[in-house]
Amino acid sequence: MRNRRVAMRAVLAVALAAATAGLSSCLGGGGRATGCTPPTDEPGLLDEYARDPVLAVRPAGARMLSLEHSAACHVSPDWPDDHTMSAVYLRLSVPHRYDLDALAEAYRQVVVAEGWQPAPDPGTGDALRYCKRIRTVTSYLRISAPDVRPEAGVMGPGGSPVPQPTPTRSRGGDIYVAISAAPTETACPVAG
């Protein structure tokens, strides 16, 4: 009889643990992405990223809005096909918009001094992208200043186009700087 009670308690403990684990992931805890490889010593790598002098650059009139860290391989229940990466993200508010040439000029000196090499941008080409190895991990620097343009083709009553303001450089904008890890890449790609 005693063995049966011990066995029943063990079954209940396992069932309770399984239910608790399932409930915590349903409540937004997410989980780890299958097949995702975080870099070795991820906390140390993120600290190294946060100390990179490129994050200290402040173009004229810029003010920091946020500085965030992200650990690799976490999956949100809201975005099950998209996992996080090891990265540090900086967002600056600037008094005017920056195009790619102005961004390159603002960051050129520190990018060169810190050994970042140009890398191809697999995205839309709206950012500066660089690469270097940090703590033996292939790491990418991405600098962008999205041009928030008025929506094209906005239609009013009767299908008539709604006049949109012309974007000007004098309106304020944001600059985004991200340093992220690509631990499965053995070397930086060569910009073509």
Image (cartoon, helix red, strand yellow):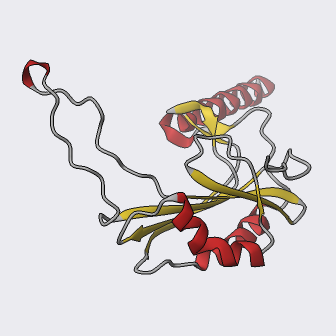
Q: Which of the two residues, 12 or 63, is positioned nearer the viewer here?
A: 63
Locate residue 103 relative to residue 65 in the image: left or right.
right
Specify the quadrant of the image occupied by residue 115.
bottom right
**What residue lies at 36% left-to-right and 49% top-to-bottom?**
148
User: Measured along the vertical axis of the image, is residue 157 above or below residue 46?
Assistant: above
User: Measured along the vertical axis of the image, is residue 26 above or below residue 182?
Assistant: above
Query: What quarter of the picture does the N terminus occupy?
Result: top right
**What residue lies at 42% left-to-right and 62% top-to-bottom?**
174
State how many labels appear: 0
**What residue lies at 68% left-to-right and 78% top-to-bottom?**
109
Residue 169, percent across and down? 35, 62
Residue 73, percent across and down? 70, 43
**What residue lies at 40% left-to-right and 63% top-to-bottom?**
97
Residue 123, percent across and down? 62, 41
Locate residue 144 relative to residue 119 in the image: left or right.
left
Q: Is residue 51 visible?
A: no
Q: Which of the two residues, 69 or 30, is positioned nearer the viewer here?
A: 69
